[in-house]
Amino acid sequence: MAKAIVVREHGGPEVLRLEDVEVAPPGEGEVQVRHTAIGVNFIDVYDRTGLYPTILPTGLGREAAGVVAAIGRRVRGFRIGERVAYAHPKPGAYAQLRNVPADRVVRLPRGIDDAEAAALMLKGLTAWYLLRRTYRVQRGDPILVHAAAGGVGLILTQWARHLGARVIGVVGSEPKAQLAKKHGCHTVLVSGRDDIVAGVKQLTRGAGVAVVYDSVGKDTFTESLDCLRPLGMMVTYGNASGPPPALNPLDLSKRGSLFLTRPTLWHYVPTRQQLDAAARELFSMVKSKKIRVRIGQRYSLADVTDAHRDLEARRTTGSTVLIP
Ligand SMILES: NC(=O)c1ccc[n+]([C@@H]2O[C@H](COP(=O)([O-])OP(=O)(O)OC[C@H]3O[C@@H](n4cnc5c(N)ncnc54)[C@H](OP(=O)(O)O)[C@@H]3O)[C@@H](O)[C@H]2O)c1
């Protein structure tokens, strides 16, 4: 038996229940991971509310770190007791113990602690593909990053700065602006206080940015398009304020033959080899201190409702980790 969060109906944070669950031995191709730190992601909110369809009852959570507790048949390359971490599209990481397909699990190098790893596998790999694959940021590129003081945001801004981008962040408050500036942003605009489109135009001498990384969605989507230079890339990768509005393709043409993409991590690391290569690049950025992983808040697994309330109320900064 192990403790795990179970969702039996969609709804607010109150639907998150801590229960005792039976964990079967790992099946063929699986490893069993005893979690030491669990990453909280905004995606978990979409799963909880039903914005992303899930079959009930369901677990929650898509990334965690821990040690290998058992190994299923036909699994190679892991030892019992070894430190590992993973991001997995199937919810269920809010638990003490879990079986995960071995090809989603990576071994943790020295120099990356468990809490950092629990924050890195989903959020860090997202920053990796956004900057290195979706739009390959080049030295001197002006870029716009929404929710710059958040979990993905602080990793993305540090990495973008390292790549030589001119990083403009958008955040919800002045304290968050200070934090984002300490983590790679050259300039930070505060939503609700600053005119984002006018601010971006002024900072780029009227040209607009090369790429917008927009995870806020409904509230920011249209103004994000207006911040782009001709042939710029609009990357809408999240819905923290709700899903973005529908778009007529002609609007992309009118604004300067823009590119639009709605990516998700799982398509960028479909194979073991691609996952390993991405994780290697990410871990080396952290080990060489080019990226500092800021764990802004920690909660016990039993207090997960507080973690979700704080995340949705925009009270968190950096990454949030649950300790089982
Ligand atoms: N597509 C992918 O592959 C992928 C992978 C990982 C994450 N994501 C997306 O990336 C985003 C960031 O994820 P995260 O886990 O790191 O969360 P986070 O950025 O730490 O938290 C969300 C932030 O969004 C901002 N926000 C703006 N309007 C909001 C609203 N109405 N309600 C709540 N928050 C609002 C808040 O920052 P301010 O107060 O500063 O505005 C808040 O702190 C999420 O949208 C998530 O879905 C996508």
Image (tube, rainbow, N blue to C red):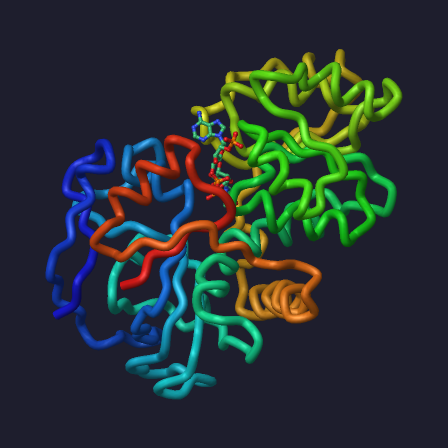
Look at 80% across and 35% down and name the residue there: 142
131 relative to 94, above or below: above
| Residue at 49% in and 43% down | 317
Note whether 211 is above or below 296 in the view shown: above
Q: Residue at x 51, y 47 (%)?
A: 318
Query: Looking at the figure, which quarter contains the N terminus?
Result: bottom left
Q: Position of residue 290 (x, y in %)?
A: 70, 61
> For residue 67, what is the image quadrant?
bottom left
Asked if one can make out residue 151 in the rendered structure from this viewpoint, the answer is yes
Spot the residue most to the bottom.
79
Looking at the image, residue 42 lies above or below residue 245: below
Is residue 236 among what the camera can see? no
Residue 280: image x %, image y %?
A: 63, 70
Between 288 and 108, the residue placed more toward the observer is 288
Above-or-below relation of 75 to 92: below
Name the foreground residue: 302 vs 156: 302
For the image shown, how many numbered marks are present on the structure?
Answer: 0
| Residue 130 at x, y percent in the picture | 64, 46
Give the quarter of the image for residue 312. Answer: top left
Residue sitting at 27 percent across and 67 percent down? 98
Quadrant of the image occupied by residue 9: top left
Of residue 267 and residue 79, the one placed in the foreground of this image is 79
Q: Position of residue 213 (x, y in %)?
A: 64, 35
Image quarter where the C terminus lies is bottom left
Q: Is residue 1 left or right of residue 137?
A: left
Viewer-side residue, 219 vs 180: 180
